[in-house]
Image (cartoon, coloured by chain):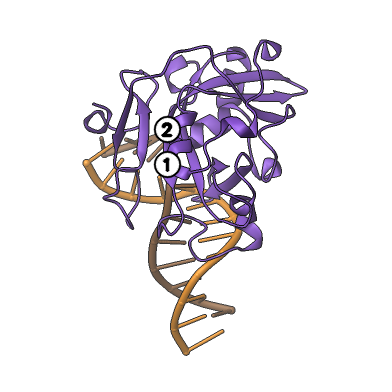
Chain colours: A purple, B brown, C orange
Amino acid sequence: MSDVYEVLGRADLPLDTVQLALGLIGKVVVRETPEGSVSGRIVETEAYPVGDAAGHAWRGERPWNRSLFLCRGHAYVHLTYGVSNMLNVSSEAAGVGAGVLIRALEPMDGLPLMQRNRRVESLRDLARGPGRLTAALDIDRSLDGIDLCRKGPLWLARDGHDAPDIGASVRIGLSREAHRPLRFYLRGNPFLSGPKMLNT
DNA sequence: AGTGCGATTGACT
DNA sequence: GTCAATCGCACTA
């Protein structure tokens, strides 16, 4: 399953947060554990660029957010509301803090394992939402800082598809910088997390 | 030390 | 539609 995918090299990642958020749409997240391999296509992202007051890097580098300051293509995993883990991809040069939040996946391989991880049957609900997809892929803080451009427990793969039809909207769940149109999604995809209003 | 609140989710009225 | 769960960090004193 996961061996049919080709790893996404760092050179394939645009050196710009918004461009990366756009470019990650349609790419594949692969998760490999002793339990098995699971994967899903990215259908929704949000950009948190340099200087964004809603970004976790905004107050400067800290031990807990240092992964955002790694060069592009590293994982930043953060626990929010004490309940849900969020998967981000660092998006700029080393020493610059910014990232792209992965908000939804279209489940591809390893459906039974995802269903077990989520304790949900419904294909549509498996990875629709940032906290749900990390649960489906068994992603937590132990994977923080990992290089997503190398095959391992968590990595990014190319897809075999054409340039997708991408829509943009405001980001979800923010109070600061709530007006900026930095959420991107695969238009018409049934696995999006946002309200219908934002998915047109 | 105490308070407020957040890139959410699931259960319930 | 409303709301509690649950934990780490920022900020105040």
| Element on which disc 2 rests | helix
Q: With respect to residue C10, does A4 lie above or below?
A: above
Q: Which chain carries label 2?
A: A
**Quadrant assignment, res A97:** bottom right
CA–CA distance in space, label 1 to label 2: 6 Å
Query: For mark 1, what is the residue?
Result: A18
Q: Measuring 49% from the left and 42% from the top, which residue is drawn there?
A: A100
Q: Measuring 52% from the left and 30% from the top, which residue is drawn there?
A: A133
Taking depth in this image into account, of C5 and A1 the one nearest to the observer is: A1
* Residue A152 locus on image (x, y percent): 75, 29
The extreme right residue here reads: A34
In-image side of A3 versus A199 (left or right): right
Pointer 1 local density, CA inside 10 Å: few below 14, some 14–19, many at least 20: many
Query: For mark 2, what is the residue?
Result: A22
Q: Residue A108 carries which label?
A: none
* Residue A107 locus on image (x, y percent): 51, 17
**Quadrant assignment, res A40:** top right
Type of amino acid at the residue the image marks with label 2 = Leu
* Residue A165 locus on image (x, y percent): 34, 20
In-image side of A171 versus A101 (left or right): left
Q: With respect to residue A154, does C1 lie above or below?
A: below
* Residue C4 locus on image (x, y percent): 41, 50
Q: With respect to residue A27, does C4 lie above or below?
A: below
Pointer 2 local density, CA inside 10 Å: few below 14, some 14–19, many at least 20: many
Q: Quadrant of the N terminus of chain A?
A: top right
Taking depth in this image into account, of A182 and A8 the one nearest to the observer is: A8
Q: Mark 1 lies on which chain?
A: A
Q: Quadrant of the C terminus of chain A?
A: top left
Q: Measuring 60% from the left and 56% from the top, which residue is drawn there?
A: A65
Type of amino acid at the residue the image marks with label 1 = Val
